Amino acid sequence: MGQEGESDNISEILYDKKYTCPVCQKKFTSKKPRHSKLRLKEEHGDFFKEYEQLNPSYYMVNVCYHCGYAYTDQFSSPKPAQIKEIKEQVSENWVPRDYGSIRDFQMAVESLKLGILCGQLKGEKYNILATLLLHTAWIHREAQDYNNEKRFLNLAREYFLKVYQEDTSGQVDLPKLLFLLGELSRRLDKRDEALSWFSKLVSDKGIKDEKMINRAREQWMLIKKEKERQSGEG
Ligand SMILES: [Zn+2]
């Protein structure tokens, strides 16, 4: 008994979006979720939104059926030298495969990994690559593959660190970035590192994002308590 706009039927939640591949110029479609139809189940500390019906991360990467170029709607359009690189590194080995249908876990992992590869080949922004790595960690968490979750959380952390150190575009949401660096470190058992990121966020006088500051304060306390408990156990 869903309310209006809600559905449990995956084929009703997804729609076909048409793309023209920026590498080979051919047309293909990719499924995208209608966010208005998704019911939130839980939001995790690292911003992973778990929905009841499906995981939108499965559909964030568009994979061209014809040449294998994989990208998100946030990628900038590739320059001629980048197109050449992608054709040599990806398209030449590509066996046409259709990612335009409903994706299972395996297809989702493949599409995200291809997206990360193509993003790296074309030198996409660190923020975009870090986000793809984070989504790859989340789908492994959901599938209870915790080794791969940690592997991708760590890679995401490394790329978010590059964003912090090198992205001077001014488009970065600094409070959210600092919080994520703290939270990913915490989830990877790097507690002292986590504490220092959360402290940075809480003590930066220029940051006015109260919500993020409070979240950082809560996580900071959580780690302090964990540390006390462990030292108490000897
Ligand atoms: Zn293509």
Image (tube, rainbow, N blue to C red):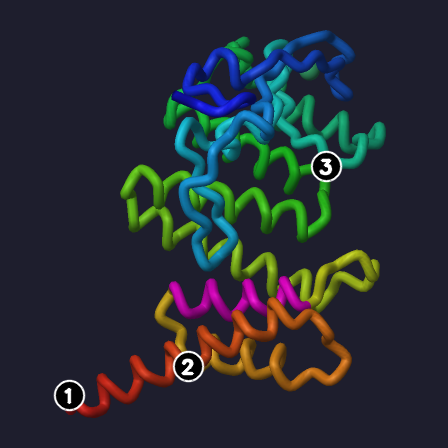
Mark found first going from the N terminus, 1 or 2: 2
Residue at (54%, 21%) from the top-left corner?
4
Q: Main secondary structure of the magenta part?
A: helix
Q: Position of residue 50 (x, y in %)?
A: 43, 41
Label 2 crowding class (10 Å Cα cut-off): few <14, some 14-19, many 20+?
Answer: few
* Residue indicated by mark 2: 221
User: Is 57 drawn above or below residue 28 in the view shown?
Assistant: below
- The amino acid type of the residue labelled 2 equals Met
Q: Magenta residues?
A: 175-187
Q: Position of residue 127 (x, y in %)?
A: 67, 52
Q: Quadrant of residue 232?
A: bottom left
Q: Is residue 212 at all visible to an observer of this figure?
A: yes
Mark found first going from the N terminus, 2 or 3: 3
Q: CA distance from mark 3 to mark 1?
A: 48 Å
| Secondary structure under the numbered disc 2 in the rendered image | helix
* Residue indicated by mark 1: 233
- The amino acid type of the residue labelled 1 equals Glu
The quadrant of the picture occupied by the C terminus is: bottom left
